[in-house]
Each structure stands twice: as C-alpha cells, then as structure tokens.
Amino acid sequence: MISEFKEFIARGNVVDLAIAVVIGASFGKIVTALVDGIIMPVVGMAMGGVDFSQLFVSLDGNDYANLALAQEAAAPVITYGAFIQTIIDFLLIALVIFLMLRGYNRLRHTAPPAEEAAAEPSEEVVLLREIRDSLRR
C-alpha cells in the first residue's frame, strides 16, 4: 500500500493539482486584499461614503450603530455587505482566469505545431510520388 501511495503522489497530475491549489489560494488572498483595500473604498465613496463591511440587518428588531455593537450584543445579523464583497471577489477572480485562458488560447492557436508543418509534403514530393506510382503500373 505504501508503494502504491508513493506512485500515486509521484504522478505529475497530483503534484500539478497541489501546485494549482496553493497558487489559487494565494491568488484569492491577493484579490481579496485588492477588493477590500482598493475597490470597495472607491465604490463606497462613489455611493456616498458607504462602508460595505458595515452593511447588515439585525434580526432581533433592535437598531445598532455598527456591526461590532450588534455582534457584541450577540444579536443575529445578516451581513449582506460581506456578501457583496465576496461576490466582487469572485467576479474579479473569474475575470482574471478568463483573460488568462483567452490569452493562452490565442497563443496556442497562432503558432502552428511543428508536426503539422512537417507532416505535409511539398508539391514537388507529391508530384514525384505520382510519377513513381504511375511508373509502377
């Protein structure tokens, strides 16, 4: 069982997947920092100084000045501001992945594979083959 496990881990697919997960998690942190530190303050200022992290609805019927006070009182709250920030995080990550895949696909389609170029014989070779085949008959 140990040798099978070593063989499984040594496969390129597992290592590639592990690297992708680590890079994806790091990229997610970068996007979250971008959204929290740069994008949301600008959007908040454009909307009249709204701090999205403080947008919430208290379910106990009381009014609280901010989210910290509601959480201190152990009030049940719906933090829809955090949800809005998470949606923006997701959209930015999806956009960046789309742009990267789009660029990758363009690079892949513009450069013809060397095998295809070498696989087609020249017109002279085709003509010589036709002559050879006709002489055999």
Image (tube, rainbow, N blue to C red):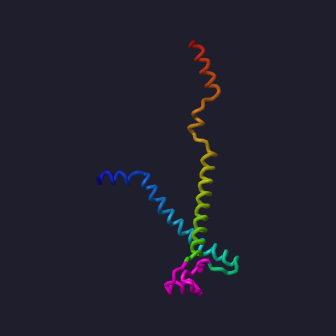
Of the 4 image quadrants, the one containing the C terminus is: top right
Picture layout, residue 95 above or below residue 10: below
Tell me where residue 28 appears, x and y as whole percent: 53, 66
Tell me where residue 76 appears, x and y as whole percent: 51, 80
Tell me where residue 112 appears, x and y as whole percent: 61, 42
Q: Is residue 49 left or right of residue 11?
A: right
User: Measuring 64% from the left and 77% from the top, which residue is drawn there?
Assistant: 41
Q: Is residue 114 left or right of residue 3?
A: right
Please provide the residue range marked out in magenta. 52-77
Query: Is residue 74 shown in magenta?
Result: yes
Between 87 and 80, the one nearer to me in the picture: 80
Between 15 and 45, the one nearer to me in the picture: 45
User: Measuring 58% from the left and 17% from the top, which residue is drawn there?
Assistant: 133
Q: Quadrant of residue 36?
A: bottom right
Between 83 and 7, the one nearer to me in the picture: 83
Residue at the far top in the pictured view: 137
Query: Is residue 31 shown in magenta?
Result: no
